[in-house]
Amino acid sequence: MNSLRPTIGVFDSGFGGLTVLRELLSLAPSARYVYLGDTARLPYGSKSRETIARYALSSAQFLREQGADLLVVACNTATALALEEIQAAMPIPVVGVIGPGARAAAATPSHPEVLVLATAATTQSGAYTRALNALGIKATEKACPLLVPLVEEGWLDQPLYKSVTLDVLRIYLIEALAQAPTADTLLLGCTHYPLLKPLIETTLQTLRHPMKVIDSANATAQAVAALLPAATAAGEPPVCEFYATDSVEKFQRLGSVFLGQQLNEVKLLDLGG
Amino acid sequence: MNSLRPTIGVFDSGFGGLTVLRELLSLAPSARYVYLGDTARLPYGSKSRETIARYALSSAQFLREQGADLLVVACNTATALALEEIQAAMPIPVVGVIGPGARAAAATPSHPEVLVLATAATTQSGAYTRALNALGIKATEKACPLLVPLVEEGWLDQPLYKSVTLDVLRIYLIEALAQAPTADTLLLGCTHYPLLKPLIETTLQTLRHPMKVIDSANATAQAVAALLPAATAAGEPPVCEFYATDSVEKFQRLGSVFLGQQLNEVKLLDLGG
């Protein structure tokens, strides 16, 4: 690893992983980042394990060719279904999003009981439940299929739109808490959900059910930063390169919402079918 | 074509095309129907024209092998991007969903001005605008990305859930009518949307903007029925076979909502990657 400016490769099936990159830019601004959104082949959620592993390996290989010293699988589905395969195939450290989120939830005060909000594909994989149970923690997973499209529509700020998103969150949380009434920790198990965190906290207040909210994007970035040389925490401004496998324009437009700042150039990449 | 019981092949990337089949079962109950939902490869919307044409051709070929005398492409994206290619490759009549919907809108009283609600992929293709303009009709398309997940979540009936869907419809229709304030005809350009028709009509009433609502599933079924022998309109009860390329259980569960009746057996089919 280049100890002055290591290269971190980050990939996701789309834009969501940019919330992980946003946290990384804050924790380790002096690294070089290469981000790949495999937008042509999203969503990974409806595909088989073999197909997802093949896609993820081709993305990992591309990022390695760009000089990555460390790889972040910033995609819940790819982490759930292919992390071990990517780790086995790559000669560099590979960090997924599920383990760090689960460990951050486990690190809360004694005997947390965790409610995981995620996409249908992630909940069906059961990966969060396995990871949390392995840490001795009781977990309930709740699929929330409307949240990703609400985030991608940007219905987060203006009152008319925000009220719909708040209603949807209220319904999902009421349903989830009916299944897990004593849960005290809420784990956001999708890289789109950090953008919903303020609205989720508002909803928990109106439901009078206080919970510690853990953001797996932040937890993942913390886990990555712990592996990096201390020099990356300050110094040079970050260098970021962005690649997408489809619609560079859409990636640039939507991506800036997830990253919280304008994306400079996005390059189109063809990884094949 | 078997004049007593012709076989109609119907395919879609998922469940939506079952709304077309539901209309067909009502108009031509005596035909034999073979339905294929290519659920393993959905959504088609984010894929290239070449990939969609390849997928659609393999589905069409499979249905032909099952004895189809006529093929219905009950998928807006496949119709928009690959109808001509399928028609050129198949020795049987092939009917898509866009032409019948556009013609039904054109058949309304003098000089209709049409607003089309559809998915982002369909509106980006511009296929409805081209079809309507070719008929001399002014058209505005509005992408409504939240409607498919709302229908798939089944948020249509119970008051708490229905009110969210009504709020979303209200927002989309206000936005759309701001672009097309004099539109008098609303074309539902997605095979999921017939399930929303009652809620859309309620919303138009509360907006005090009456419009003729045209359902492309119904229009397509009318166009297909016109090609069938008269004997199919009555007589034997229908025979239906269902194939899906992924999760037969999910297909059976969700599919019954779209079809408006229980699906009998659903067979798993592997069409390859």
Image (tube, coloured by chain):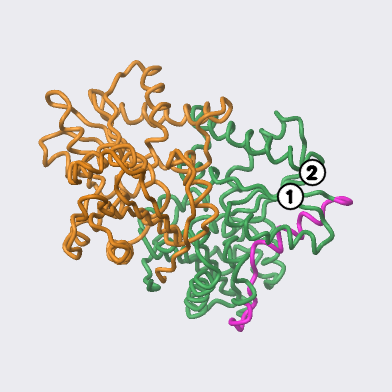
Chain colours: A green, B orange
Q: Chain of mark 1?
A: A
Secondary structure beneath label 1: strand
State the image quarter where residue A268 is shown.
bottom left
A49 or B18, nearer to the observer: B18
Residue A35 visible from this viewpoint: yes
Task: From the viewer's side, name the closer residue of A83 and B92.
Answer: B92
In the displayed structure, B63 sits above or below A169; it is below
Q: Is residue B52 visible?
A: no
Dot label at residue B107: none
Residue occupying the point 18% across, 59% down: B92
Horizontal side of A227 relative to B114 (left or right) equals: right
In the image, the segment drawn in magenta is A87-111
Q: Amino acid at mark 1?
A: Thr
Left or right? Give the position of A233 relative to A35: right
Q: Are marks 1 and 2 on the same chain?
A: yes
Chain letter, disc 2 residue: A
- Does the segment drawn in magenta span residue A109? yes
Q: Which residue is mark 2?
A: A183
Cα distance, mark 1 to mark 2?
8 Å
Which residue type does callout 2 highlight? Ala
Residue reaching furthest to the right: A110
Earlier residue among tags 1 and 2: 1
Side of A115 relative to A23 (left or right): right
Which labelled disc corresponds to residue A140?
1
SS label for mark 2: loop
Marks 1 and 2 in Cβ contact (< 8 Å)? yes
Specify whether A103 is left or right of B44: right
